[in-house]
Image (spheres, rainbow, N blue to C red):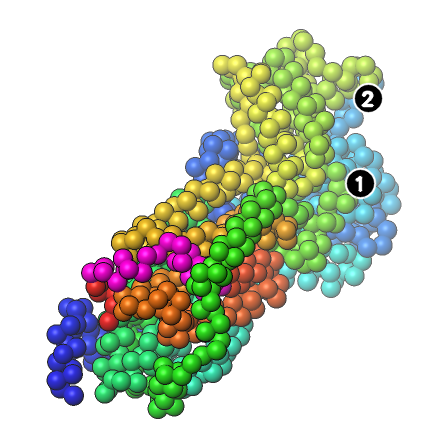
């Protein structure tokens, strides 16, 4: 035995000797690191921000940030609609409830109190034209006492306020409390300390202090809440279910692993080391100052999946080696020597899929990329190093070893059948089928769209409470929650000039006649109303005057529609929805108009408002989609080329992945799933994770070809040794990820569906298409004469 060990020790690499000659130190170090990072992992909290969800370097966002102080209530806001279930809003009971809600919201941390607006706000005023000129005042005057007379006066004031369809529903059955938010605000307990807005906590406060409290107090009132902060809060709440899905995935994997390995010891070893990888990833995430946002909460799933993939390969290899190795240590060392480099290359390929996401200028995607890259890096230590070392102590059960011995010598009808994929008659048929699928996928993939394809929050289910609230506001108010803001820049004191106002008027007319636009409001809207009022309300005078003094006077009541220096006048465009087509039409209309009408002292800048942010995000996604795929494939191809030193081998591994990407795009187009922040990462991740199968299969195939076997026989032996691990891994991971499809969060369900499809198709492509391509691209004679590499035992 010593002679055998010595023989293998001579062939061992420096890394192998360093690890296996110091096994107690390796395990002790891993235990210490695990304890430290487990403590760090317990400190990880859900965390996100408005800025992380938007592409900060996009010109639209840059324009918005440059004028952020001049744009009131057009950033991160929440809208609370208070509905009168029976009757209308003009009752003492309703108005008292609305006042209480207004006051309650005022004291919630994170609310920009200066911009809070409802019918009870002093800034909400009415105006009318009388024989003596203009008259006006607060919609709810100081003399309001809830009497029938006061309520009748309130009704008149609302009719004259211009707030119908905005703060008050068209049917007078509800009104809105408009709540602007601060990303950072002073600590109520210590004003010198600044706190960051916690979206989950803020969402919970809205539920507890507003919805639950007032709907219980007054059954005649129903609360509807929409806005970015509420949507993110609901997403985080829904994603807490991820823990449950992780538990289900763990149990499924445990059962399938036990069935596959027939060994409890190795099953526990694989699961334990993979859980260690997840713990390390979460701990390191907190150590570098990151939290978990609605998108990166899915990363631990991916790390678990990748870890299981590599763990199964190691256990399968050790079981095969144990049939003729004298000790578990020798079997572990041989497997480490044989699989460490292909495993390392596969992990680097996984990492490439994540790292390429860094090119996207959106904070949540970049944090996902960083977090996932960290997770992939730790798998090198946990599943490629710690797992073989652990197995070298505990070994594989005799039952598993005996089964491996029997499998090594007996004929396998199933693998023999699959080996026909490498047959000279079957391979051309496979290639033709693949080409037909590629052509069909490309044709269907042309229908794939960028951005959201549904109203409301597509990240949530259509029947979710948020989307029902959003639907209520769309149906009952003239101004939707989807607002595109065009920033019209002029010289100082130039916003009231006829040239500027006339251009804004022309742009408003163009936009209001654009499909998908509800209405547009600007300085011009107020100016025309005032000029008409100054001329006894005659409709003939509802137009712009060329007299500068008249124009200056007409905009004096347009609070919030121009800045203090009168150099910026926002044009608010209310859209039917934020679907990609609607945004594209509105943006194109503005850009075409700007091209023809911009001057040195008159600029039309896009874009603020939630629809403007969505349009910018869509542009970034559209520009990044192809770039990411190209980068992923270039990096994967380069790594395969360096590893196998063969263009043919690289094509055999990469071409099935390309087919999967094309079919994945076709599936998204068929199911009506748009390419957006939630789904774009899947496209890159599917390539990175899927390349593992091809690398492991080709590594074994090349080794058998070098032994002198024909291609079909070499593939049969490959299937016997590593094919079952690839098949099992693909099915196991797909079943685990498929549990996401039942999530209450639609974007998680979409990601689960896409990843399940890509995992299965990458596995099938490696088993079916790789040998067919090898039949045409690989020259077995050339492989046999190739100098032996460190990949082969």
Q: Is the residue under label 1 in contact with that under label 2 (CB below 8 Å)?
A: no
Q: Closer to the camera, 17 or 699?
A: 699
For mark 2, give the secondary structure.
strand
Would you say 465 lies left or right of 233 here?
Answer: right
Outermost residue, front side: 425
From the image, state whether disc 2 or disc 1 is nearer to you.
Answer: 1
Q: Is residue 42 visible?
A: no
The residue indicated by pointer 1 is 170
Q: Secondary structure at mark 1?
A: loop
| Residue drawn at point x = 79 percent, y = 61 percent | 219
Residue at 78%, 14% in the rendered image: 541
Q: Left or right? Give the position of 185 relative to 488.
A: left
> Which quarter of the rendering shows the C terminus?
bottom left
Residues 137 and 515: in front is 515
Residue 131: name its quadrant. top right
Q: Nearer the viewer, residue 118 or 369?
A: 369
- Which class describes the residues within 10 Å of circle 2: few (<14), some (14-19), or many (20+)? few
Task: Please give the range of residues in magenta.
Answer: 764-787
Magenta residue check for 646: no
Q: Is residue 597 above or below residue 324?
A: above
N-terminal of the two: label 2 or label 1? 2
Across and down, in percent, residue 703 comes to 29, 67
If the image is split into quadrants, where does the N terminus sit? bottom left
- Residue at the spot of label 2: 130
Q: Pinpoint residue 610: horizontal percent, then vertical percent.
A: 58, 40
Q: Residue furthest top?
A: 547
Q: Nearer the viewer, residue 98 or 335?
A: 335
């Amino acid at each position: 035995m010593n002679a055998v060990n010595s023989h293998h020790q001579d062939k061992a690499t420096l890394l192998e000797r360093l690890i296996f000659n110091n096994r107690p130190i390796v395990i002790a170090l891993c235990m210490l690191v695990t304890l430290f990072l487990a403590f760090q992992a317990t400190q990880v909290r859900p965390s996100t921000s408005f800025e992380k969800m938007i592409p900060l370097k996009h010109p639209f966002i840059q324009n918005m940030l440059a004028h952020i102080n001049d744009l009131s209530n057009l950033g991160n806001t929440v809208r609370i609609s208070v509905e009168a279930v029976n009757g209308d809003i003009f009752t003492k009971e309703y108005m008292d409830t609305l006042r209480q809600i207004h006051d309650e919201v005022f004291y919630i941390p994170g609310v920009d109190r200066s911009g809070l607006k409802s019918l009870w706000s002093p800034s909400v005023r009415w105006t009318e034209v009388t024989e003596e000129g203009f008259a006006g005042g607060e919609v709810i005057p100081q003399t309001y006492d809830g009497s029938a007379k006061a309520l009748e006066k309130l009704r008149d004031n609302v009719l004259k306020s211009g707030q119908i369809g905005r703060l008050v529903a068209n049917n007078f059955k509800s009104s809105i409390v408009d709540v602007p938010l601060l990303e950072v605000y002073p600590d109520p307990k210590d004003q010198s300390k600044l706190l960051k807005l916690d979206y989950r906590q803020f969402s919970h406060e809205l539920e507890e202090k507003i919805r639950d409290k007032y709907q219980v107090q007054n059954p005649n009132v129903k609360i509807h809440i929409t806005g970015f902060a509420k949507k993110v809060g609901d997403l985080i709440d829904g994603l807490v279910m991820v823990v449950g899905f992780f538990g289900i995935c763990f149990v499924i994997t445990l059962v399938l692993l036990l069935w596959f390995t027939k060994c409890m010891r190795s099953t526990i070893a694989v699961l334990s080391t993979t859980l260690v990888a997840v713990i390390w990833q979460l701990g390191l995430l907190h150590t570098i100052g990151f939290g978990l946002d609605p998108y990166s909460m899915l990363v631990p799933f991916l790390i678990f999946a990748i870890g299981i993939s590599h763990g199964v390969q190691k256990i399968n290899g050790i079981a095969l080696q144990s049939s003729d190795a004298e000790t578990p240590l020798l079997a572990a060392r041989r497997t480490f020597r044989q699989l460490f480099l292909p495993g390392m290359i596969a992990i680097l390929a996984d990492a490439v899929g994540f790292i390429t996401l860094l090119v996207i200028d959106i904070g949540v995607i970049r944090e996902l990329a960083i977090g996932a890259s960290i997770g992939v890096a730790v798998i090198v230590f946990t599943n490629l190093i710690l797992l073989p070392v652990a197995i070298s102590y505990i070994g594989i059960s005799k039952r598993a070893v005996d089964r491996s011995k029997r499998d090594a010598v007996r004929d396998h009808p199933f693998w023999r059948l699959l080996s026909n994929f490498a047959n000279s008659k079957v391979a051309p048929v496979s290639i033709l089928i693949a080409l037909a699928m590629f052509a069909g996928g490309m044709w269907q993939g042309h229908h794939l769209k960028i951005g959201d394809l549904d109203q409301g929050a597509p990240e949530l289910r259509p029947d979710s409470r948020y989307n029902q609230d959003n639907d209520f506001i769309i149906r009952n108010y003239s101004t939707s929650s989807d607002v595109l803001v065009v920033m019209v820049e002029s010289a100082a004191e130039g916003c009231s000039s006829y040239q500027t106002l006339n251009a804004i008027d022309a742009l408003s007319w163009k936009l209001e006649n654009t499909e998908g636009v509800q209405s547009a409001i600007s300085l011009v809207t107020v100016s025309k109303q005032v000029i008409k009022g100054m001329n006894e309300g005659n409709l003939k005078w509802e137009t712009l005057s060329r007299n500068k003094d008249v124009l200056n006077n007409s905009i004096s009541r347009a609070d919030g529609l121009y800045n203090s220096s009168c150099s910026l006048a926002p044009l608010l465009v209310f859209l039917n929805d934020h679907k990609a087509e609607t945004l594209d039409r509105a943006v194109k209309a503005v850009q075409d108009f700007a091209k023809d009408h911009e001057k040195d002292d008159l600029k039309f800048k896009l874009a603020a408002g939630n629809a403007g942010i969505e349009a910018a995000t869509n542009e970034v996604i559209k520009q990044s989609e192809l770039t990411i795929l190209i980068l992923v494939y270039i990096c994967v191809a380069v790594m395969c080329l360096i590893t196998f030193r063969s263009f043919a081998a690289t094509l055999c591994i990469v071409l099935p992945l390309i087919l999967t990407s094309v079919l994945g795009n076709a599936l998204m187009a068929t199911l009506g799933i748009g390419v957006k922040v939630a789904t774009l990462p899947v496209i890159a991740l599917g390539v990175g994770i899927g390349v593992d199968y091809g690398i492991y299969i080709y590594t074994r195939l090349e080794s058998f070809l070098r032994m002198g076997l024909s291609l079909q026989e070499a593939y049969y032996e490959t299937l016997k040794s590593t094919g079952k691990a690839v098949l099992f891994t693909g099915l196991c991971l797909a079943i685990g990820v498929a549990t996401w499809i039942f999530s209450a969060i639609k974007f998680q369900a979409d990601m689960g569906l896409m990843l399940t499809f890509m995992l299965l198709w990458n596995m099938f492509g490696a088993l079916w298409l790789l040998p067919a391509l090898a039949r045409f691209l690989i020259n077995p004679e050339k492989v046999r004469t190739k100098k032996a590499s460190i990949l082969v035992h």
